[in-house]
């Protein structure tokens, strides 16, 4: 009888990751995961070391948003538990991140010893991750380990959510047992519901005089951007996007009307969306941020909403209609619309930049950044006023705006940009970040510097937690002043600029754009009362909620 | 009928914290916790803002180790979930940290909206913290909120573990309902078991020729350091301590023999401990680190082990004997021992420091630091070789050595030192930290700089993850080189030194000791193969475990 030698479990995991498109794994090593790191070092997958584990998770999130799947590998306890916030963020924002955690060996765990990095029963770590992932597996049985690996990777792709894989260190080199591969089964639609939903949509489109599309985040997560373009071009439909869906359509497309988010939208976008007699909402999540803190005025009688697995028309639902199927069928069946696209308002021509001796403002900063955007630039935006200001940016390509727009965790941008730039070598990250958020994770830029990546960081420095200042002022909103432009002193190669005027910003931006072998950081001093209009409207609303008023 | 106006819930919480000795609360504000911050700002409790939430939790841990209770206040989701690792560490190390998390209002939660910072069902955050705390409370019912607050604060003190309090923002100003205060009931001993355990111990002491005490971490956590001193002085007993119990007795006490941790101990300490015919283990936890990775050779037939709530003599147990009661009874009953204390080995006299032109080594560094320690210095030590090297330091007072000695989470030292120095204004933190750990949380030193605290940081810079290098070398152990001495460029006031020789270190140390109004940081370049002997022994052992060998 032949003895077939199968892969070891660690090897199989690496192969499945690679086959699924994961060419890089982020993380910090530790003794419970060192055996896996050693295997990874000998595999075609490249390890990208980060300074901390939470930033590894943010980087994997940014990578996943660009390529459809990302991964990190960390040690037990001290490593994995450091990623909980970032992984919860990936869950909230539907980003398929694979968390690989080392663990004490199965044999080590048997006698229940008080070994280092332990904080409770050994299963508690998995129980914590069960609350922030869509599937978990502890690979403690070689007979089913391959099957478990297939299952969680498939779950991450199917649900676009993080998953958790725990690998006890004495199982990494154990031979596994091949089983039938789980087919990556897409969400299946009910054919009757699908055709009826499409037919009703077409009938409504035929009767409508001002139909339009609202594009949401799920189009990005399901990779449906091209079908969206096909639909709006065939049917001649104007299109808006939500904030979390920003850049799901290239924002220089002639049919694009800008971001809609209720009272926070520009007046024109708001008017066009709210007067539409047929709003086709595709992959839109009705969360607090995308509805402009529930200020959106969308009459359900005039909307067709295609969610991930159902279509809602007015007050009735078609369950089990997958977004992808619905969109394909619609594209195939739709006739060119009769209604003309309302003309886009003429953009005020950009006034000359820089004005001599003019202190830089948030508005002018965005205006100038807008001019600088090119097709190779991915904008990665942190939370705070920079996010609200960035609504007005027009990025070029599809999915070239990344932000923690719904979960709104500070500290996302710098490490997520690392992930994005590793995922897309031909691209360049432009990072917009506040001073408070940069103090949380900004030193991860050290990794961009180490790898020679040419990210450009623009710090919106308004000295403290400005969003909160607008809600409730107090000394707790003050933070230490950092000279962000001097960061290269701590870890080079990195060029830094300190900027207070338009002229200084112009010069710093041009030098940053020209520098292709290292990161640049521009510390932009803004007046502390110079906040974006969107943020002022938002803060007014939030203020009333601090004490629970309604 | 008189209408009595009671406190609001937020106010009551602040009062109970203050009464329990919490004069400072660490944290980062966020809109779900802003109302509580506003109340705190008007209370006698001082808020200490940190750059991130995990560092706030480490700071609260350091504070709790100094004063018996510490607290942090953070926002929901993005804030609280960032603290999971640090709070798990406090749990593993028995440090009573109170986590206060804001939350969406009860009325806001009712319709299950997709509001920002949400990552799942609203109760998931509590469920995560249930796995890393000893008590949790969600204050969503004003009628019982005061009672819940009393209960969790009492639990933290009783069990010396973290607790979790979640306060929905619309309940902060709601009037609460006073109830009978829960008495802080200490662990009660069974009188028969107590007196029998003490009698047996005394009988064994009477027969023993080489009795001694091993002092553990629980003596610190229960505040029993003075009783320990009384015992060893009355009974003339030599004493050793575990690594996690380091400094539970002042290390210049004549009866003190140094740290015992199995094969990692000094030869003398190991010999004396392992040949003792009666080892009185007080508050010792037999974890992996304190047993020198299970290399300790302690014959149970020659030990009496008083744990938190039981006494174990040879192979029999006295359940329900509280450590505090046992120790008091023993102190009261013990007769001066007949056995003479074995003489301590003469310490080699410190050779003159600095030697001209001599490159600095880990051993010489520790030797010089030892000379510099004074009664006002608290040593706060991170994980890695600095921890193993620090075994040889002799701190002056009680509980003046803080480390994550068992959970061994990197990044503990700088923020924990912030907490310690805030807790003990007359003291000064000497921080020992590796280059990898400093990259994780070292920028929290910004807060020490902002507050004008005179912490001294000594970076053991050996360019990478050295502990892991000893176990398994690979490119994943390399990290970016940071010029730690230039940190003041990023955020001053802070003085920095770059050091490669003994002479340079001497000069930097003297300048640091003389500087009392700002932090100092000394970047000490060590040869990458210059590891402590204890670490080399440890790594040898760990190496065999990476692949699960035994």
Image: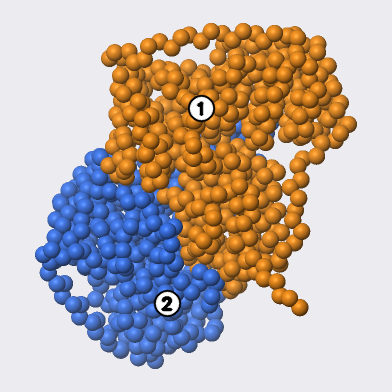
Chain colours: A blue, B orange
Does residue A171 sit above or below A127 in this rendering?
A: above
**Eye-nearest disc, 1 or 2:** 1
Q: Quadrant of the C terminus of chain B?
A: top right
Q: Nearer the viewer, residue B171 or B16?
A: B16
Q: Visible in this render: residue A496?
A: yes
Q: Nearer the viewer, residue A465 or A79?
A: A465
Residue B193 horizontal/vertical position (percent): 86, 30
Which SS class for mark 2? strand
Q: Residue at x 72, y 14 (%)?
A: B211
Which SS class for mark 1? loop
Does residue A22 sit above or below A277 in this rendering?
A: above
Q: Visible in this render: residue A219?
A: no
Q: Nearer the viewer, residue A143 or A455?
A: A455
Q: Which residue is mark 1?
A: B375
Q: Residue at x 40, y 82 (%)?
A: A279
Q: Which residue is mark 2?
A: A281
Does residue A281 sit above or below B503 in this rendering?
A: below
Q: Residue furthest right?
A: B192
Q: Quadrant of the N terminus of chain B?
A: bottom right
């Amino acid at each position: 009888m032949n003895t077939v030698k199968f892969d070891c479990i660690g090897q199989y995991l690496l192969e499945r990751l690679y086959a699924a498109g994961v060419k890089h794994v982020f993380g910090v090593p530790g003794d419970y995961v060192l055996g896996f790191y050693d295997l990874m070092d000998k595999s075609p997958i490249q390890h990208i070391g980060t300074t901390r584990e939470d930033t590894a998770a943010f980087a994997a999130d940014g990578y996943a948003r660009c390529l459809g799947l990302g991964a990190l590998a960390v040690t037990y306890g001290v490593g994995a538990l450091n990623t909980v916030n970032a992984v919860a963020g990936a869950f909230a924002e539907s980003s398929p991140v694979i968390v690989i955690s080392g663990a004490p060996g199965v044999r080590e765990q048997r006698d229940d010893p008080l070994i280092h990095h332990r904080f409770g029963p050994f299963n508690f770590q998995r129980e914590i991750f069960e609350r922030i992932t869509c599937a978990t597996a502890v690979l403690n049985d070689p007979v089913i380990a391959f099957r478990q690996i297939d299952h969680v990777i498939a779950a991450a792709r199917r649900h676009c959510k993080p998953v958790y894989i725990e690998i006890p260190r004495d199982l990494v080199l154990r031979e596994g047992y091949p089983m039938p591969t789980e087919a990556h089964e897409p969400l299946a639609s009910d054919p009757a519901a699908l055709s009826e939903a499409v037919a009703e949509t077409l009938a409504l489109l035929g009767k409508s005089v001002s139909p339009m599309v609202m594009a949401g985040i799920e189009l990005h997560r399901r990779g449906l951007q091209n079908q969206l373009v096909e639909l709006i071009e065939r049917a001649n439909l104007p299109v808006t996007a939500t904030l979390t869906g920003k850049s799901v359509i290239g924002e220089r497309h002639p049919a694009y009307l800008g971001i809609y988010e209720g009272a926070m939208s520009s007046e024109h976008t708001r008017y066009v969306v709210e007067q539409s007699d047929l709003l086709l909402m595709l992959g839109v999540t009705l969360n607090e941020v995308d509805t402009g803190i529930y200020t959106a005025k969308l009459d359900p009688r005039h909307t067709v909403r295609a969610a991930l697995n159902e279509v809602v028309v007015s007050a009735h639902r078609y369950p089990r209609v997958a977004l992808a199927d619905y969109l394909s069928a619609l594209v195939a069946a739709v006739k060119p619309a009769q209604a003309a696209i309302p003309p886009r308002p003429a953009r005020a021509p950009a006034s000359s930049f820089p004005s001599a001796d003019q202190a830089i403002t948030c508005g002018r900063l965005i205006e100038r950044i807008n001019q600088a955007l090119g097709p190779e630039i991915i904008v990665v935006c942190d939370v705070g006023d920079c996010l609200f200001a960035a609504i007005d940016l027009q990025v070029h390509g599809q999915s070239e705006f990344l932000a923690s727009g719904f979960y709104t965790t500070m500290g996302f941008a710098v490490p997520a940009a690392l992930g994005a730039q590793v995922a897309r070598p031909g691209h360049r990250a432009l990072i917009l970040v506040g001073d408070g958020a940069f103090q949380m994770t900004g030193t991860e830029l050290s990794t961009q510097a180490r790898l020679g990546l040419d990210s450009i960081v623009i710090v919106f420095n308004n000295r403290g937690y400005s969003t909160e200042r607008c809600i409730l002022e107090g000394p707790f909103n003050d933070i230490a002043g950092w000279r962000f432009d001097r960061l290269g002193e701590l870890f080079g190669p990195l060029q830094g600029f300190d900027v207070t005027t338009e002229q200084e910003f112009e010069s710093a931006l041009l030098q940053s754009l020209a520098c292709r072998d290292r990161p640049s950081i521009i510390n932009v001093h803004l007046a502390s009362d110079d906040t974006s209009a969107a943020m002022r409207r938002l803060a007014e609303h939030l203020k009333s909620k601090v004490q629970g008023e309604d």
